[in-house]
Image: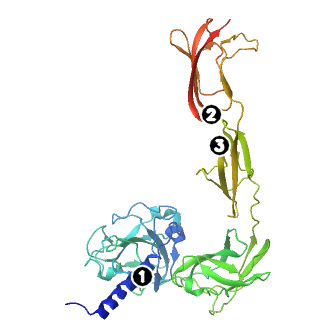
Amino acid sequence: MRRPRQLRFVWFWLIAFFAFVQATIAQTVLPPLQPEQDACNALYLCGNRFTTPFSYQGLGAVKDFNTTPCGGDESNSMWMEVKVAEAGILAFDIIPISKEDDYDFAVFDVTGRSCERVSSAPVVRCNFNNNFPGSNENGVVGLRPEGKSNNVQAGHFGDPFARSIDARTGQSFLIMINNFGNYVSGGASSGFTIDFNRSTAKFEGSQPPVMNRIVKTCSDSSVTIGFSLPVRCNSIAADGSDFYTEPFIPITSVTPLNCTYGNGYTREVTIQFGAKLPEGPYTVINRIGSDGNTYVNLCGDVADPGQQVSFAVPPQIVRDFLPYSLTKCSYDIDTLRATREFVHYAWSTGAITPSIEVEDSGTYSLTVTDTNTCVATINILVRDSTCPEYFYAPNAFSPNGDGRNDLFRPVFMGSPRQYNFSIYNRYGQRVFASNKSWEGWDGRINNNPQAPDTYVWVCRFRLRKKDEIRKGTVLLVR
């Protein structure tokens, strides 16, 4: 049956709308090396429900463990932590935002262990089953009392729930969750909710978040500050009213890192000022903003107002670390070198060293980064000049130790490259070889003086931007 034109039009726009939604979801994929991808920076949860709109890539800065009883390991992972304040059942559901997303997990008992020793901690529960159609209803996996076993093997079909944990007061658990992506589209995951409402155990609370650091940025119109704990994106007033400065500088907006439309959580915010700041010291102070709070961590703890963190506007890099021009002999190789030390170097040739050697004329550029993350670039014009150039090899030498003609070697005007010089006696034996143009033969082999005779030499080198071979004879005179 042919659809009416109006219905086809509506159908087209529905498809376009869902494609837009899917593209929007895909934008929540975080860059690699997020802090919570390592066990020591696990997100601390206090129970109830927690939702992340993010998808993770890679392992974090370290690989925290190698394998589990389920046969799976760490992949596109993130970590969470809970501490038991009152004994009871520890259970949770991991509910994907998209039911086609495949999430695996492992629970580590880290009671009495530091986060660096996760690899030696027992894996008390894990589930690495697949999420093919019919395996996990709506993609949900987790721990429940009706779970059949402690561990569900990698690739297993069905059994979405491992057995819940009888948690004791004082126990600490790390929960690693792998984002295996969407089995339909093959793309990244779209986030999930972890729901502890089936737990009877009570969890310890957290501490209010604290402004505790400045993230170095080379800016005179913004500053990025960090928190001791992740804070909810939607608890930060977008107008910047959660913060003010001394001396006073108007704040126009605040941008939390990794926040999408107010969802998720962040460890850093960038404060944008309404005017350029002169060099000097400043202090950022938090307060109750237009949203009725300061900022709130994942457990709902509100930061105390009056917290302070100081910063200084860094000086810009003075662009005098490289001359703007250089003239060299056309056959010469010259060295371009930064006159000051920096954290990072990037030459237009692709080199990342403080200096480079150049043979060709033209414009070269060097971009440097200092300890304040300030960046500057200088272009240098290298010109070639016509200079005398020649190759000369004497036809005799007398290695008698009188300081005159004691060594035999070619003489260059210019800087030869790919240099190789060899000398042979009348029997074809090589008596001398060197790849250094300043080294010469003293008429000896293994410190034994050679008889006066005529010797053959061969010299290979690159000069005047072309490869050359010269041959000749030399008379050794005693």
Q: Amino acid at mark 3?
A: Glu
Quadrant housing residue 142: bottom left
Q: Which residue is mark 2?
A: 464
Identity of the residue drawn at 69% across and 75% down: 223
Alpha-carbon span between mark 2 and mark 1: 60 Å
Circle number at residue 305: none
Where residue 10 sits: x, y (%)?
34, 91
Q: Earlier in the sequence, mark 2 or mark 1?
A: 1
Classify mark 3: helix, strand or loop: strand
- Name which quarter of the figure residue 343 lies in: bottom right
> Residue at label 3?
357
Residue at numbered disc 1: 20
Image-based side of 187 in relation to 250, left or right: left
> In this view of the protein, which residue sits in the foreground, 233 or 195?
233
Secondary structure under tag 1 reads helix
How many residues crowd around disc 1 within 10 Å: few (fewer than 14), some, or many (20 or more)? few
Q: CA distance from mark 3 to mark 2?
A: 16 Å
Numbered-mark total: 3
Task: Name the N-terminal-most of marks 3 and 1.
Answer: 1
**4 on left or right of 122:** left
Q: Quadrant of the C terminus?
A: top right
Residue 316 position, x and y percent, is 75, 65
**Residue farthest along the front direction in this orientation:** 386
